[in-house]
Amino acid sequence: MRETVTLEEGELRASDEARNLRALAVIERLALAGQPYTLSQLATRLSIPKATLMRLIEALEVCGYVSHVPDSRGSERGLSLGPRAARLALVTLANNNFTRAARSLLRALVDRVGETVNLTALDGDEILYIERVETNEPLRMQMHPGMRVPLHCTASGKLFLSQMPVAERRAVLSRLSLKRMTPRTITDVSLLEAELDRLAARGIGIDNEEFVRGMVAVGVPVRALDDGHVRAVLAVHGPTARVTLEQLLALVPTLRETATALAPLLDWQRAGKAEALAKLADAREQRRAV
């Protein structure tokens, strides 16, 4: 078994900036992928020669940032993020200033509504959990930040879909499998579009036991302050043994209050990323000028 080493010990040393950027591109692509990539798929997607990519993957695997994922027969199926990349992502998420502030607001909301609440974002054709605070009740669904769930059968996913322009929504729906998760999952495109139109008029998302049997959820949008676009969804969910969909719908005004408080945090987060990118661009220009 190869020993995992650290970047500080010298692996991934590169004589040019291109190799470092390629390594970051590999990690980012695998992080955003919903399933493992084969080497050929990754080379095509990133426009990197296969031989070059193979050497890069070998170095990243030694570091623990990339793993080979075997199938049930033990043969290689593809490439995914390694355990070290996953740990780094979770630590970054947990210590992010935005996450800490959002978590505080979500905890206060849980105290008010008594059920689990979560904050999600649209990531490709999936929903990504940004933050989540669990209820203290013993009966609850265990999920955590970083997890991904489908668009077509979750309150957050249906809300994002409902707010898309029609052409964009149909393009997304054409790519989704509309897998039946429960007997209540809407798997017919026409019926789902009709449901999304109704939700768009109400400005909310609803999951009526469509993702997990015995679990209902309601979501409201968190909109950008500048253009009003939906940046995230704040949702509450609970088991039908304890709460009804109608009871969750009655919490919409309370959810909207917290969504309004979250909106500035999302804008600060976006501003922080823009500032970081600007600084990176400036640094590159300075290096070229030297």
Image: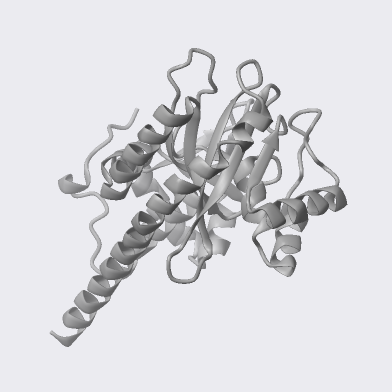
Residue 220 drawn above or below residue 273 = above
Residue 35 seen anywhere in this rendered image of the structure: no
Q: Residue at x 28, y 46 (%)?
A: 96
Quarter of the figure with residue 166: bottom right
Q: Position of residue 229 (x, y in %)?
A: 53, 65
Q: In the picture, which quadrant includes the N terminus?
A: top left
Q: Residue at x 36, y 58 (%)?
A: 264
Q: Position of residue 153 (x, y in %)?
A: 70, 40
Farthest residue to the bottom: give it.
Answer: 289
Farthest residue to the top: give it.
Answer: 138
Q: Residue at x 59, y 45 (%)?
A: 156
Q: Is residue 160 left or right of residue 86?
A: right
Q: Give the colouring mode of the picture.
A: one colour
Residue 226 drawn above or below residue 122 = below
Q: Is residue 217 left or right of residue 54?
A: right
Q: Is residue 7 left or right of residue 221?
A: left
Q: In the picture, which quadrant includes the C terminus?
A: bottom left
Residue 285 drawn above or below residue 256 = below
Residue 21 seen anywhere in this rendered image of the structure: yes
How many callouts does the rendering have? 0
Q: Position of residue 43 (x, y in %)?
A: 53, 60
Q: Is residue 169 left or right of residue 67?
A: right
Q: Residue at x 69, y 66 (%)?
A: 168
